[in-house]
């Protein structure tokens, strides 16, 4: 095989891998999934947050917790979506935390990118989470799970 052919094969492989990665990420981005955090021994762990963790009271019925960063464009859109939903549903609070200022909580909750949204029930248990900009309808549906 000539060097030109080898280069073309490598370029095609890289392009294919990048396309597959992009399609998978687009499909998963912003989807609110059940909290699937596993502890050290493989058991499910339900993470619970309190007012002391967030620095503000939890909502009476549920809390929409958003981790953001200063230069994150999707974070601004996420802020609008979550504020709209919190304003529509009584007893739901929207709390936004700067990920850089809350590194201990980021590590504890395994937040790897911003925006990350956690849906907490009235007791502070994490019931759903999404990395990326969630759709408004998905947030409302996740709240239904947290409130019931």
Image: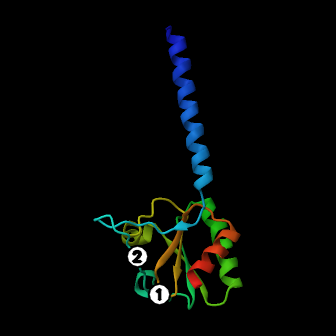
> Which residue does the image show at 58% across and 66% down from the upper left?
32
Q: Position of residue 61 (x, y in %)?
A: 57, 89
Residue extending farthest top: 2
In the structure shown, which secondary structural element does the residue marked by tag 2 occupy?
Answer: loop
- Circle number at residue 145: none
Q: Residues within 10 Å of mark 1 (few under 14, many from 20)?
A: some
Q: Tell me which numbered mark, 2 or 1, is placed earlier along the sequence.
A: 2
- Marks 2/1: CA–CA distance: 11 Å
Task: Give above or below for 81 relative to 7.
Answer: below
- On the image, the x and y values in percent for residue 80 come to 68, 72
Task: Report if the CB atoms under discs 2 and 1 are less than 8 Å apart.
Answer: no
Residue 47, which numbered label? Answer: 2
Regarding residue 67, the answer to whether it shows in the image is no
Q: Quadrant of the C terminus?
A: bottom right
Answer left or right for 120 relative to 110. right
Mark 2, Cα crowd under 10 Å, few <14 / some 14-19 / many 20+, is: some
Quarter of the view holding residue 89: bottom right
> Which image quadrant for residue 131?
bottom right
Q: Point out residue 92 in the picture as x, y percentages from the top left corner.
A: 61, 85
Considering only vertical position in the picture, is 65 above or below 59?
above
Q: Is residue 40 visible?
A: yes
How many tags in the picture? 2
Scheme of colours in the image? rainbow
- Foreground residue among 67 and 144: 144
Say which element carries label 1: loop
Q: Position of residue 62 (x, y in %)?
A: 56, 84
Which residue occupies the foreground of this view, 136 or 34? 34
Query: Where 1 sits versus 87, above or below?
Result: above
Q: Point out the residue furthest to the left here.
A: 41
Tell whether 41 sits left or right of 18. left
Residue 123 badge = 1
């Amino acid at each position: 095989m000539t060097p030109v052919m080898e280069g073309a094969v490598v370029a095609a492989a890289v392009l294919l891998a990048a396309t597959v990665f992009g399609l998978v990420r687009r499909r998963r981005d912003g989807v609110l999934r059940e909290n699937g955090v596993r502890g050290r021994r493989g058991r499910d762990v339900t993470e619970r947050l309190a007012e002391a963790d967030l620095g503000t009271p939890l909502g009476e019925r549920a809390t929409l917790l958003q981790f953001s960063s200063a230069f994150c464009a999707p974070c601004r859109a996420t802020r609008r979506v979550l504020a709209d939903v919190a304003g529509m549903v009584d007893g739901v609070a929207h709390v936004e935390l700067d990920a850089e200022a809350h590194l201990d909580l980021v590590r504890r909750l395994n937040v790897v990118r911003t925006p990350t949204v956690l849906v907490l029930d009235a007791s502070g248990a994490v019931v759903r989470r999404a990395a990326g900009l969630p759709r408004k309808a998905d947030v409302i549906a996740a709240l239904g799970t947290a409130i019931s």
